[in-house]
Every structure is written in structure tokens, then in C-alpha cells.
């Protein structure tokens, strides 16, 4: 994962505070995009959430499962604080199951609930 981050540019196609293209009530709390020249299970680039630290440092990954589409994906979290992570987790609705896997090389911050 680290090599992908070092060798590929991030393209932000959904800036912070923009609406989801199919669900306008869903507003992106942070910049969201993908890693260029990569491929995820949906055929697009690997998704990326860019946190407030605005770095390429891997904070962790999200494993998401869309119950309606029966689709699973991973999403890289870059430069995310615990507040950023909470905002991202709150972005996903009841049709999505989300598993957060922290980067074991980074110090873990306690999440607020």
C-alpha cells in the first residue's frame, strides 16, 4: 500500500462539502477521490479519503460493504485524525457496513463515540 501511495497521484473528484452525485443529501465531510493508475473491485481507482493533515501518510483503510449493491471495496485513509475518522464513518448510511483497519505503524488515537 505504501508503494502505491508513493508512486501514484491522488485525484480528488469529490471535494470537501460537495454532494454525492447520486445521493445529493450525502455531503462529503472531507476530500474524496482515488489513486490514479490503480484498480479497485469496481474497476475504478482505489478510493481515498484525504484527512485534515493533508498528507499521503496512511492512517488506515476502510473495508466497506454495500448491502443494497452487494459490493465490497477498500478505501485508503490518508492523514486522518480521530475527528476526521468519525466524520467519515458518520458519512456512511445504514445500507453500508464499514470496518476500520488502522495502520499498525501509526500511533492509535482513541476514537470518540
Image (cartoon, rainbow, N blue to C red):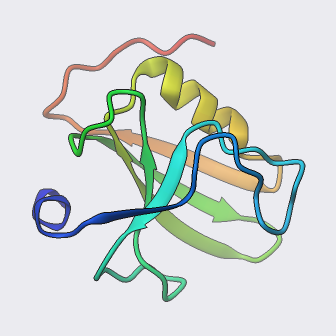
User: Does 57 sit left or right of 21 as displayed?
Assistant: left
- Residue 55, horizontal then vertical, whole percent: 25, 38
Depth check, front residue: 92 or 21: 21
User: Does 76 sit left or right of 104 as displayed?
Assistant: right
Q: Residue at x 31, y 34 (%)?
A: 79
- Residue at the bottom extreme of this rendering: 43
Depth check, front residue: 110 or 11: 11
Depth check, front residue: 35 or 68: 35
Q: Residue at x 52, y 46 (%)?
A: 31
- Residue 39, horizontal then vertical, whole percent: 37, 83
User: Does 75 sit left or right of 15 as displayed?
Assistant: left
Q: Residue at x 50, y 30 (%)?
A: 85
- Residue 17, horizontal then vertical, whole percent: 68, 40
Q: Residue at x 38, y 31 (%)?
A: 80
Q: Where is residue 52, by image quadrant?
A: top left
- Residue 57, horizontal then vertical, whole percent: 21, 40
Q: Quadrant of the N terminus?
A: bottom left
Amino acid at each position: 500500500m505504501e508503494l502505491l501511495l508513493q508512486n501514484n497521484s491522488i485525484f480528488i473528484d469529490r471535494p470537501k462539502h460537495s454532494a454525492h452525485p447520486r445521493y445529493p443529501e450525502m455531503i462529503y465531510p472531507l476530500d474524496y477521490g482515488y489513486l490514479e493508475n490503480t484498480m479497485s473491485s469496481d474497476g475504478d481507482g482505489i478510493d481515498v479519503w484525504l484527512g485534515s493533515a493533508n498528507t499521503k501518510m496512511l492512517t488506515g483503510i476502510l473495508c466497506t460493504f454495500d448491502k443494497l449493491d452487494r459490493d465490497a471495496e477498500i478505501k485508503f485513509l490518508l492523514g486522518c485524525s480521530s475527528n476526521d475518522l468519525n466524520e467519515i464513518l458518520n458519512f456512511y448510511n445504514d445500507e453500508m457496513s464499514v470496518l476500520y483497519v488502522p495502520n499498525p505503524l501509526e500511533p492509535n488515537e482513541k476514537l470518540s463515540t
